[in-house]
Image: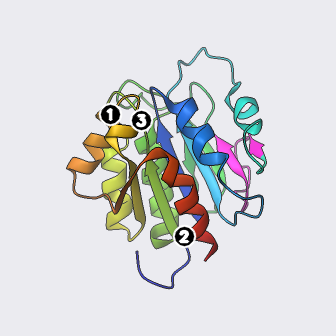
């Protein structure tokens, strides 16, 4: 990332162990956190959309189960619903797709990361967390190519290390951080 250039949006992706990872990170963010956060948790398409409610219990920011074409606002967290890819449209609104699963997942992390990097470029931070497949690795590469910052949870702090390991192997990760360090890093990096 270029010095002095603000990052305005954060995208995160997780699979196995994601609930613990997300609650740890989001609980560390202050209520005046300036960036929008969009997150994907691998879920079965028939799952109840309870993740926004669960995450809201652990953080000071509003957690949204977004509608299609919902504006992406600073200081809000948007959670991909089960059964849909969550994307960022060029007008900085949320869009949904029922395109084919990616790495057996819909929502898929790569789909969010690709669309967000296209829209935000160097104003984007991508965070890849615990998980048991390679979803998100290609998305991190694309975020880096577009000038964004990429963070991987350290494999040793991951319940399932395959996903962060795959992203790290691409060479496209700017920082590898233990789970407990990711929230404080984002708060410091994006507020400064």
* Residue plotted at (68% across, 18% down): 48
Decide if residue 8 is in sight here. no
Secondary structure under tag 2 reads helix
Neighbours of disc 1 within 10 Å: few (<14), some (14-19), many (20+)? many
* Residue plotted at (76% across, 64% down): 32
Q: What stretch of residues is rendered in magenta?
A: 63-79
Question: Which label's residue is closer to the chain start, 2 or 3?
Answer: 3
In space, the residues marked 1 and 2 are separated at their CA atoms by 25 Å
Choose top left, top right, bottom left or bottom right for residue 117.
Answer: bottom left
Question: Which label's residue is closer to the chain start, 1 or 2?
Answer: 1
Q: Which corner quadrant holds the C terminus?
A: bottom right
- Residue 114 location, x and y as percent? 42, 52
Question: Which label's residue is closer to the chain start, 1 or 3?
Answer: 3
In space, the residues marked 1 and 3 are separated at their CA atoms by 6 Å
- 102 and 54: which is toward the camera: 54
Query: In the figure, 130 relative to 128: above or below?
Result: above
Mark number for residue 130? 3
């Amino acid at each position: 990332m270029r010095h002095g250039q603000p990052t305005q949006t954060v995208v995160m992706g997780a699979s196995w162990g994601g609930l613990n990872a997300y609650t740890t990170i989001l609980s560390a963010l202050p209520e005046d956190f300036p960036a929008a956060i969009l997150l994907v948790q691998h879920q079965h398409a028939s799952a109840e959309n309870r993740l926004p409610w669960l995450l809201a219990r652990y953080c000071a920011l509003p957690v949204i189960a977004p509608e299609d074409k919902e504006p992406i606002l600073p200081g809000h967290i948007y959670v991909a619903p089960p059964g849909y890819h969550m994307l960022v449209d060029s007008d900085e609104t949320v869009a949904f797709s029922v395109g084919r699963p990616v790495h057996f997942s819909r929502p898929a992390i790569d789909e969010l990361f690709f669309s967000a990097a296209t829209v935000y470029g160097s104003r984007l931070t991508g965070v890849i967390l615990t998980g048991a497949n390679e979803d998100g690795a290609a998305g991190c590469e694309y975020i880096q190519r577009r000038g964004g910052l990429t963070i991987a949870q350290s494999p040793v702090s991951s319940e399932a290390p395959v996903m962060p390991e795959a992203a790290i192997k691409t060479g496209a990760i700017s920082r590898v951080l233990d789970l407990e360090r990711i929230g404080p890093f984002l708060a410091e990096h994006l507020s400064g």
